[in-house]
Image: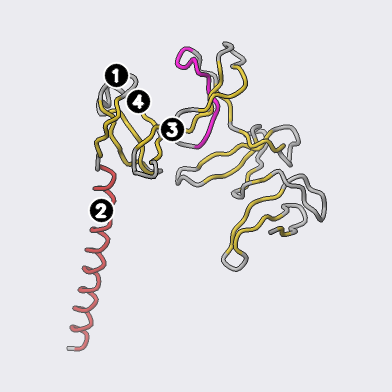
Amino acid sequence: MYGEVEWHNLLKQYYESLNVLISEVDYKEAKKSAVEETDLKCDKCGNPMVLKWGRNGQFLACSNFPECKNIKNFTRSEDGKIEILKPKTLDKKCPKCGSDLLLKEGRFGKFIACSNFPKCKYTEPYTIGIKCPECKDGQITEKKNKKGKFFYSCSNYPECKFITNNKPVAISCPKCGNYYLEEKKSKDKGEFKECPKCKNIVY
């Protein structure tokens, strides 16, 4: 009798856990498939732009997909209005065709591309202005992984394997003189900067 009651309790707990899991999956799938209409027009074909969900959050896409694959990053103003994030024009020219270079943001973070795309497909990684500490030749680049989290690696990858999850900043270490620190955060220390060389902490 006792064993039968225990078995029924285990079976009940199993189905309760299964129902919770199914509900979570259904919610995630519904969120991904949800499409929100906007008053913005596609700058390529003129059809309405809609908000869709991707693995890194919401993005603007042409409602005429798959015929038109135009997508845009966006932000919301204080009053909730959707505003397209326009690429920033840089003060440098494309080494291939001489057109302006633009700072864009894609699925894996920021990158530099030619404004004459698709005629010119030149691109280069977005660097943060700090030399790689390992190869001393490349620059540190900012990228996103598949989960949308930032990481920093050398522009000479795969020849140079330098990588860190902490953002390097161009501040010299007051203790050892190292030319950069890394931004970090912890529950007990809060936000701080740490020297990757001597581990000196700066608040």
Q: In the image, residue 107 lies at what x, y percent?
A: 45, 36
Apparent side of residue 197 relative to residue 149 in the rendered image (left or right): right
- Of 87 and 196, which appears nearest the observer? 87
Residue located at (67% from left, 50% from top): 182
Q: Which residue is mark 1?
A: 45
User: Going from the N terminus, do you reach mark 4 or mark 2 first?
Assistant: 2
The first of marks 3 and 2 along the sequence is: 2
Q: CA distance from mark 3 to mark 2?
A: 29 Å
| Amino acid, disc 4 | Asn
* Dot in front, 4 or 2: 4
What's under tag 1, amino acid-wise?
A: Cys
Q: Nearer the viewer, residue 169 or 151?
A: 169
Nearest the viewer among 175 and 7 is: 175
Q: CA distance from mark 4 to mark 2?
A: 27 Å
Determine which residue is flagged by label 3: 85
Q: Secondary structure at mark 2?
A: helix
| Residue highlighted by disc 4 | 70
Mark 4 and 2 residues: CB-CB less than 8 Å, in contact? Answer: no
202, above or below 170, in the image: below
Label disc, if present, on residue 27 of the rendered structure:
2
Name which of mark 4 and mark 1 comes first in the sequence: 1
Looking at the rendered structure, the secondary structure element under dot 4 is: loop
Q: Residue at x 59, y 49 (%)?
A: 165
Give the secondary structure at mark 3: loop
Residue 52: within the magenta?
no
Is residue 176 shown left or right of residue 137?
right
Pointer 4 with pointer 1, Cβ within 8 A: yes
Q: In the image, is 201 to the left or to the right of 191?
A: right
Residue ID at (21%, 88%): 2
Q: Residue at x 63, y 44 (%)?
A: 163
